[in-house]
Image (cartoon, rainbow, N blue to C red):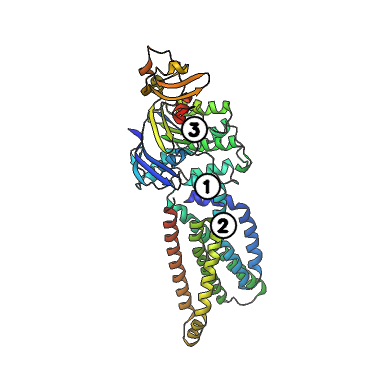
Amino acid sequence: MKALLLKDFYTLIKQIKIYIVMIIVFACIPGNSIAAIAMVYAAMLPITALAYDERSKWDSLALMMPYSDRSIVLSKYILGYIAVAAAFLISIVAQIAITLIKNTAFEPEGIVSLILIACIATVVQAVNLPSMFKFGVEKGRLAFFVLVGIITGVGMVIGDRLAGFLSTSYINIITAMLVTVIFTLAINLISIALSTRIYKKRV
Amino acid sequence: MNAIEIKNLSKSYPGFDLRDINLVLPAGSIMGLVGENGAGKSTTLKLIMNAISRDSGSVQVLGVNNRSNEFNVVKEDIGVVLDEAYFPEVLTPKNVGKVMKNTYRNWDEACYYNFLDRFKLPETKAFKDFSRGMKMKLAIAVAMSHSPKLLILDEATSGLDPIVRDEILDIFNDFTRDETHSVLISSHIVSDLEKICDYIAFIHNGRLLFCEEKDKLLEEYAIIKMSKADFEKIPEEAVRGKKVSKYGVEALVLKSAVSGVFSTEYTTLEDIILFLAKGDKK
């Protein structure tokens, strides 16, 4: 596993350098939308790593080496988690630094929002990766957009009803966050199991 | 112990069918896998490493079923070189060394850097800027640097100049001085196989035509060149392949069936392969 992560790190080193500068710049701009972009972008790094693997046909060699199917799949997820966690931490440090510089009160809601954004980023990754393992990066991207389209469509249909329900219910922020985290974990575990199954069923 | 034991191995793709492959590679020996493009050599090697799923049959590598969980541990003892090196193109040999150090428990860094030095591979140059020969040398350096007991080589010497090829064949030959070490090598360059192999397995159209000791094969077959009229006298069951031209007939025959009666010429492995692959060619 460490070897595979190291391989991806060396492969992505140029992107990672640009990316770190980008996150630091973005994270220093007040507001969560920029942090959201940084974290979702971080969750896309495994796709870039997979694209490099495909270009060099690394899988042909990896299958001959003592890597289990599970570790090959899991390494891509972990790469994404590390990247999202890094973006998350940099965003928090930047927010704290801004409050210290401006000498304003620190707002814990900011951290809650960042946690939710990190969850969304890993959910995006969880939705994305199985289609990448199944169809490859080029076709997988298309499958991902189709899937996002379906989810958005379904979301629009049930969204209003859900909003109506939430406006009449009392759900505190901690409960909402817990539900989101549990949902994120579940989606990720299902996604990992699905990707491993897809990878094992290679021709 | 046998390094590889394959029984009734079959795999079908649309338009291609590898059927009933049976072969045994005894420990301490080198086996050459020969066959034309698309004959099924690479598919066989991938099936041995369980990199693709098989339809039927069984494969034991270094005494372990290649579908068992234990096989991942056995892979530590197998060095593989494929027809291309397939390392990510931005990696340098130094990067590759660090990745492999975390891949193989028996990774021997000193041995790896010795090979880099011996092959004159720059440690910090990106893999994408390497020539094909350099890429293959890097793959060979990796395969040799984790104390493997078995080498599986798929066209590992293609694209290399004759001098380097010879040097690498010597490395493979030295490798099997240890009687627990074995090599399975596929190649189009039959002369390379003739130079180093103890056994030859010939795959043609997805079927294993033979898997024999090289010396026995060279002993078994002979070439005859004669007029069409004289050729009529050769027993049909002795002929394994022939080329008929307006000048006469050249044929691969079983030496035992014609010796003493007709004069024969020494055959090479390449002749045997060509005649058996082409059969009767007018």
CA distance for labels 3 and 2:
33 Å
Return the residue at label 2. A138
SS for dot 1: helix
Q: Residue at label 1?
A: A58
Q: Which residue is mark 3?
A: B187
| Mark 2 and mark 1: Cα distance apart in space | 16 Å
Mark 3 on the same chain as mark 2: no
Residues B22 and A58: in front is: B22
Q: Nearer the viewer, residue B242 or A113?
A: B242
**Who comes first in sequence, dot 2 or dot 1?**
1
Please give the chain letter of the residue carrying mark 1: A
Question: Residue type at mark 1?
Answer: Trp
Query: Which of these two is toward me, A168 or B44?
Result: B44
Q: Is residue B99 left or right of residue B53?
A: right
- Disc 1 to disc 3, how far (Cα)? 22 Å
Q: State the residue in front, A94 or B136.
A: B136
Residue with the most extreme front position? B229
Q: Provide the chain ID for the residue under circle 3.
A: B
The numbered dot on residue B246 is: none
Q: Mark 1 near mark 3, Cβ–Cβ under 8 Å?
A: no
Residue B173 shows in the view? no
Looking at the rendered image, the disc whose residue lies closer to the viewer, 2 or 1, is 2
Q: Amino acid at mark 2?
A: Glu
